[in-house]
Amino acid sequence: MADDNIVIAGYPEKELWQQYRSAKDQSIRDAIVKQYAPLVKYVAGKVSVGMPQSVDFDDLVGFGIFGLFDAIEKFDPDKHVRFKTYAVTRIRGAIFDELRSIDWVPRSVRQKIREIEETIQHLEAKLGRAATDEEVATELGMNIEQYNQLMLKTSGTSMLSLNDIWYNSEVNVNVSAVESIESPSSLRPDAIAEKDEMRRVIVDAINELPDKEKKVLVLYYYEDLTLKEIGKVLDVTESRISQLHTKAISRLRAKLMNVKKGIF
C-alpha cells in the first residue's frame, strides 16, 4: 500500500495518489517527483559500485529519472505495494536498460563471462547439482585462486544480471529475474502462468545457491544493502562480496539457460 504517513504537498500520500489517478494533474506529478528524486540518486549510487570509470554517475541518475517517471505513471495505489518499493524496481530497470543499449561492457570481458556461464551450465547439467567453485575452475583450466581473480575482474558487469529479461517467444512475455510487482491484469491467462512459473524457477535457483552467495543476493537485492555494508554483515572484504555476487549471478544465469533448454 502507499505510505500513508508521508505527506507530499500538504496531502497524505495515499490521497495524493488517488487525486493523480483521477485527474493526472501535472502539479501533483511534480510534487511526487520532487519527493522521490533522492531515491533516484540512491539507486544510481548502488548501481555505480563496481562500474568502470567510464560510466558517469550523473548519467546513471539521468537514466533513473525516466524510471521514476515510468513508476509514477504505472503505480497502482490499490495494490499492496509501497510506491518506494515499486519505484526502486523501475528506476533500477531504467538504468540497466540504458546501460545495455550503450553496450558498455568490453567485448573481451563479455566473451569471458559467456565462457564462465556456459561452463557452469554444462557442468550442472552433467552433474545434476550445483557445481563447486573448484569444479568450475578445473573445467576452465585454472586453479581456484585464478578463478576467484577472474570473478573479481568481471564483477562490475554482474550488477546488471538479475535484471536481465527472460523472453519466451511463444507467449510473448518479458519476465525480470527480480520479482515483478506490476499488476498482471493486462496479460492473458497463459502469460500470467508463464510469469508465475518463471518466478518459481528463479526462487528455486536462488535456494540452490551456496549459503553465502544466497545471503549476498538477498542482502543486495531485497534488503537493499551496498556491497560494503554486506561485507560488514558477513565479516569479509568488499572485494570478496563482489566475487560472491558474481559467482551467484553466473550460477543463476546458467541455471535459467538450462531450464529454458528443458535440461532441468
Image: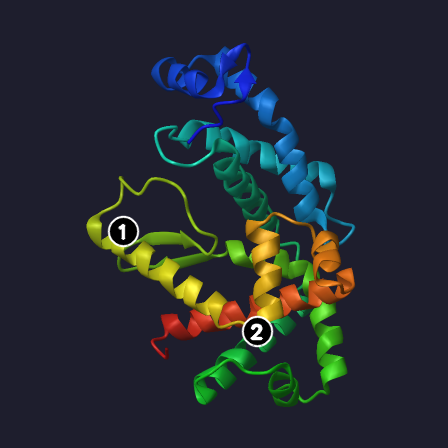
* Residue 110 higher or lower than 101, as above or below: below
* Residue 84 higher or lower than 95, as above or below: above
Q: Nearer the viewer, residue 260 or 8?
A: 8
Do we see residue 110 in this rendering? no
Res. 157 image quadrant: bottom right
**Residue at (58%, 45%) from the top-left corner?**
98
Residue 148: image location, x then y, percent: 72, 76
Residue 192: numbered disc: 1
Amino acid type of the residue that numbered disc 1 sits on in the rendered structure? Ile
Identify the image quadrant of the C terminus: bottom left
First-in-chain label (2 vs 1): 1
Identify the image quadrant of the N terminus: top left
Residue 8 as seen in the image, left or right of residue 177: right
Q: Residues within 10 Å of mark 1 (few under 14, many from 20)?
A: some
Question: Gap in Å between the C-alphas at discs 2 and 1?
Answer: 30 Å
**Residue at (37%, 13%) from the top-left corner?**
23
